[in-house]
Image (spheres, grey):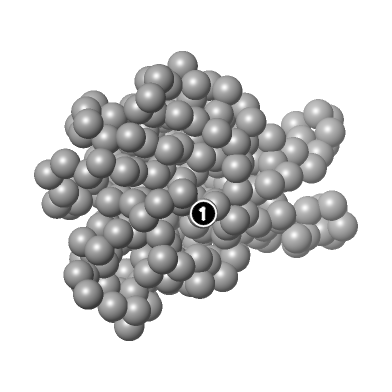
Amino acid sequence: MSRQAAAAVWDPAQYGVFGDERARPFADLMARVDLAAPRRVADLGCGSGELTAALARRWPDAVIEALDSSPDMVAAARAHEIPGRLRFTVGDVTTWRPAAPLDLIVSNAVLHWVPDHDDLLVRWATEALAPGGRLAFQVPGNFDAPSHAILRELCASPRWRDRLGGLAPGRPVRDAAGYHDLLTRHGCAVDAWETTYVQTLHGDDPVLEWMKGTTLRPVLSALGPAEANEFLDVYGACLRGAYPPTPHGTVFPFRRIFVVAAREDP
């Protein structure tokens, strides 16, 4: 994964603050996976494991290998292990290789942390999948949203650029058409689409709390407690201006990009 993601300290509890909202894209992705009974499955970037456990419930005969780069996330995920069926390990998705071809590879909200992940996707689709297998992934597509544009501006400001200039989120993903083109050119039948979820978040500074669970992890990991609080005070004030609270909550539009690629039989 990227230097930023590898260096970040991940917090399963913070990530789970908006668990229902984070789970919805996964459910929408998996609803388009048309496999009746996959036997060999990998979940690459499994996080704290709740969504991987849903795969085990859907396909009770599948053997699932789940991987994440965060020891803290994997430690939380191991509560969901099923001996002989579902196993969680710490590892790097960029160097992972399956022991045998798989029926399904799932990667949920991970690949935006991997620079230049086109080659990785092609390798998974053409080398790691069995004929007829599926590669299913989704990534955020909101890198031009105010939440991320403000963060880039702050990280590049004179106050923070020496510490954080290399940690601001860029625009690391293709759009749905781009992934469709990439994987179709490598022999896959591709279903690709985009959705913007108009999420209504509740609580104090909810967009800041959302960002603290994901995109802010590398930034917070690079700062001491006093500096982190200073940064969050400024960033939180900017987010309140960009996403003002309303009587029914704070509206936070979030674009997602989805792909299900089928490796066609030779």
Residue at the image point whose x is 87% and y is 57% from the top: 162
Q: Quadrant of the C terminus?
A: bottom left
Question: Which residue is at the front of the view, 118 or 81?
Answer: 81
Q: Is residue 60 left or right of residue 211?
A: left
Q: Does 266 appear above or below 206?
A: below
Which x, y percent locates residue 182?
37, 78
Which x, y percent locates residue 26?
31, 43
Give the amino acid at mark 1: Arg
Residue at the image point whose x is 55% and y is 33% from the top: 89
Q: Quadrant of the N terminus?
A: bottom right
Q: Would you call the spot at circle 1 few (<14 residues within 10 Å), some (14-19), or many (20 or more)? A: few
Q: Does 57 appear above or below 166?
A: above
Residue at the image point whose x is 54% and y is 52% from the top: 96
* Number of marks in picture: 1
Callout 1: helix, strand or loop? loop
Question: Which residue is at the front of the view, 224 or 61?
Answer: 61
Question: Which residue is at the front of the view, 251 or 135?
Answer: 135
Q: Is residue 179 left or right of residue 61?
A: right
Given the current orientation, which residue lies at the most extreme right position? 162
Which x, y percent locates residue 10?
62, 33
Residue at the image point whose x is 71% and y is 54% from the top: 3
Residue 186 visible at all: yes
Report which residue position mark 1 lands on.
Answer: 97
Given the current orientation, which residue lies at the most extreme front position? 100
